[in-house]
Amino acid sequence: MTITKILNKAIEGDFLCIEEGLMLWENAPLALLMAAAYKRRCMLHPETKVSWIIDRNVNYTNICQSACSFCNFWRSKNHPEACTTQMDDYHAKIRELYALGGRQLLLQGGLHPDLRLGFYTDLFNNLKHHYPDLKLHALGPPEIAHISKLEGINYTECLIALREAGLDSLPGAGAEILVDRVRQKLSPNKCSVDEWLDVMRAAHQLNITSSATMMLGHIETVEERFEHLAAIREVQAQKPENAKGFLSFIPWPYQGEGTILSKREKNLKPLNGSDYIRMIALSRLFLPNIPNIQASWLTVGKAIGQICLHAGANDFGSIMIEENVVSVAGADHKFDAAGIQQAIKEAGFIPIQRNQEFETVNHR
């Protein structure tokens, strides 16, 4: 099949196979990919609007037994810098979030060996008691799998308990590359590919909105990137008709400053801007059943992020009031609410503030 025929197939929303994705990656000119992805984007989002959100990333702990080789944030249980966030800290952080017009916590941490389900349900209940309109975009498949194993329960039971305590949506954290060969080298103590996908299947059965992510540009092959895309596309296709499932997909390049992985793998080459734009475009074309594609300005910067808005992305993510994981591995780009809106306008689009459900919210 020719490049033109593959692109036309993708524009119409048909599923591409991995071989077709590879052909586009290897042979399609970037400008042609961008044009096709933008056309597909406009079929789903005909207005020239780009969404963004105010939320705050709060890490409930930095104690983690996963010990991922790409992460500088985790600490062992007995490390002098090990910590668990206390309620006074939550109150201070949430007050600042509210003052800036945000109403959502991206609440994540590590695979703590001792924190059981009751810790999370108590925390969620406490936060919702003090802040009834606060949205908890919390945990992720690795944590759900970990908590479920500690409790001896299945993913559905774990998710129901968390939802009853206040969980609003489930981030796509811990996906990295959904290929077990890669995961065994990056994070052998974290959930497997099947476990990650099964947690998301369970969430979608409960109509818990989720997102999906990809960390690329390390030891994975291009073909494995498309295996990752095909896996989340399949899970999305399996969701109940009334469920939103994966509302967004966020690919971001590996940040390797000072990580064990970068010290171990001497031949790693940082993903360049052109390849990131290419991945954004191919994500839009390869994932016709996931409505929103986010450009990760935090890791690629303003200019590349703006170009991605012309390559299929329709979302610019969060101003990230607080971010502690990729920032300690080299990501140092910053935005406030005015800055992110200005960046969107400069790219030729209308900024629209949203919530996690991609509903428009009023500016405060």
Image (tube, rainbow, N blue to C red):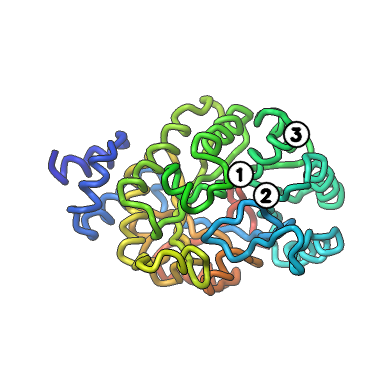
In the picture, residue 321 is in which quadrant?
bottom right
Mark 2: which amino acid? Leu
Q: Which mark is residue 151?
A: 3
Q: Residue 165 carries which label?
A: none
- Left or right: residue 83 compared with residue 302: right
Q: Considering only order in the chain, which callout, 2 or 1, is on the residue closer to the N terminus?
A: 2
Q: Look at the image and tell me whether residue 96 can be seen.
A: yes
Q: How far apart are marks 3 and 2 (CA)?
A: 13 Å
**Quadrant in which the C terminus is drawn:** bottom right
Mark 1: which amino acid? Pro
Check contact, mark 3 vs mark 2: CB within 8 A: no
Check contact, mark 1 vs mark 2: CB within 8 A: yes
- Left or right: residue 359 compared with residue 147: left
- Residue pointed to by mark 1: 142
Callout 2 crowding tier (Cα within 10 Å): few <14, some 14–19, many ≥20: many
Callout 3 crowding tier (Cα within 10 Å): few <14, some 14–19, many ≥20: few
- Residue pointed to by mark 2: 111
Judging depth in this view, the residue of 151 and 99 nearest the camera is: 151
Q: Position of residue 40 (x, y in %)?
A: 32, 46
Kindly identify the residue that appears in the image at 42 percent across and 65 percent down. Answer: 305
364 shown above or below 185: below
Q: Considering only order in the chain, which callout, 2 or 3, is on the residue closer to the N terminus?
A: 2
Q: Distance between the residues labelled 1 and 2?
A: 8 Å
